Amino acid sequence: MPKTAAPKLKTQYVCTNCGSVYARWSGKCPECGEWNTLIEEVVEERSAAAGRRVPALGARPQKLADVRADAIQRLPLPIGEFSRVLGGGIVPGSLVLIGGDPGIGKSTLLLQSAVLVARHVGPTLYVSGEESAQQIKMRAERLGVGDSELYLLTETNLDAVVHAIEIMKPKLCIVDSIQTMYVDGLQSSPGTVTQVRESAQRLQAIAKASDVAVFIVGHVTKEGNIAGPKVLEHIVDTVLQLEGDRFQSFRVLRSMKNRFGATSEVGVFEMAGDGMREVLNPSEAFLAERMRHAPGSTVAVTMEGTRPLLVEVQALTSATQNPMPRRTANGFDYNRLFLLIAVLGKRIGIRLYDQDVFVNVVGGLTIDEPAADLAAAVAIASAHKGTPVSADIAVVGEVGLSGEIRSVGQLNQRLNEAARLGFTRCILPKTARKVEHPPEGLQLLPVRSLGEALDVALSA
């Protein structure tokens, strides 16, 4: 019998950050500029004829006017905070990527969601490549959901997973995690860029073809980014990030990308012994332990997606003999902190060159929007002068380099949330558009500059 020719193998180097492929190794990726991100992979070299694809006969261009755009019938998800982040429910045929630090609660949240979908919507498949069926059963019993009709599959071969989806046709399939899956025929090991990318593409194909919603768990790197190339985030329809401080009980589920809803939407949970509990009033929870009339404490009115959140911003200044004073920010942008310190020194005359400055956002929340600038600046000035800010004042506004206070968006929603929580005064930009129907009982204190804002906040 004629011998079958052995497949030709070649070595290539793939960047774990951007997915670029190179023939030779180098310490720095020429494409993204990151160091030590190229890893070696052995792949099968395909011939030119084998790489050609025959186009499907049914794939023909059609007019935009002829395309039907019926409303998407979302699957209900009884966890309201999770449903909010997804845009109102689970979209059939969607591919959702969920990332987060180890032990943050990804598997717990997904197991709870899978159980509820199995009870109220239809059959659900939970694929685990890291835990055995017995381990999942023990966690389910701890969460109080051990009697569910949820189907379990402990498998790392993606072909077997796809076969199970085709036979079972579940409403929802959860794959935990994508880094443990492998595709037969690829020479690289599970978790490599090639395997992760190919696995995600296979899952995307089966999700679109069978209208099965697929949730995949992705590991994160030490920098906090989802492991694997950025192309993995381009393949999926939605990217969710579960954030939180491991020393805090609060968890924030944030939407980084969503083709079926608003981006930057957040859902707030609390990690408890029986699983992840919804926090229906996050602002009240974040302010529950606030010490009133303490120097260095202010309340910022921020927006996370379409939801207004009130959070406490704390600051502390301490004299130091070090030639390089420390600047520490927890939950606040580090570069914005340097900007505010410079503006306070140059425009207001508050010299902090011999002071260590610490800024903390209480509750483990991370604030990215510039609307929290004024609250952080007021907190730093309050801590430095030792003068507290009145407990009934909320603060919102962006600080410019000239010391001016710039307007922010969605001001009506912010003010309504502040009034609902009992605040009676709010410092806001004077240049903001006229507030339509200001909340009853909330006095507006418009300011044009940082100096005016400090006079109002600290004199009260």
Image (spheres, grey):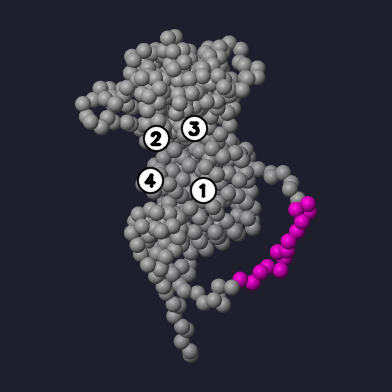
Query: Sequence-wise, which precedes: disc 4 or disc 3?
Result: 4
In the structure shown, which secondary structural element does the residue marked by tag 1 occupy?
A: strand
Of mark 4 and mark 2, the one earlier in the sequence is 4
Residue beneath disc 1 = 97
In front of the other: label 2 or label 1?
A: 2
Q: Quadrant of the C terminus?
A: top left
The mark closer to the camera, 2 or 3, is 2
Label 4 to label 3, Cα distance in Å? 21 Å
Q: Which residue is mark 2?
A: 335
Residue lying at 50% horizontally and 55% vertically, measured from the top left: 231
Mark earlier in primary sequence (2, 3):
2
Residue type at mark 3 is Glu
Kindly report which numbered mark, 4 or 3, lies closer to the viewer in this rendering.
3
Give SS at disc 3.
Answer: loop
Which element type, helix, strand or loop, lies under badge 4? loop
Q: Which residues are magenta?
A: 53-66
Q: Three-letter amino acid code at disc 1?
A: Leu
- The answer to which quarter of the image holds residue 52 is bottom right
Task: Tell me, yes or no, whether the highlighted magenta stretch contains residue 56.
Answer: yes
In this view, the residue farthest toward the left is 321
Seen as rendered, the residue at the extreme bottom is 1
Q: Amino acid at mark 4?
A: Glu
Mark 2 secondary-structure assignment: helix
Q: Is residue 235 visible?
A: yes
> Which mark is on residue 274?
none
In this view, the residue in front, 147 or 303, is 303
Q: Which residue is mark 4?
A: 223
Within-10-Å neighbours for mark 4: few <14, some 14–19, many 20+: few
* Front: mark 1 or 3: 3
- Name the magenta segment's main secondary structure: loop
The residue that disc 3 covers is: 369
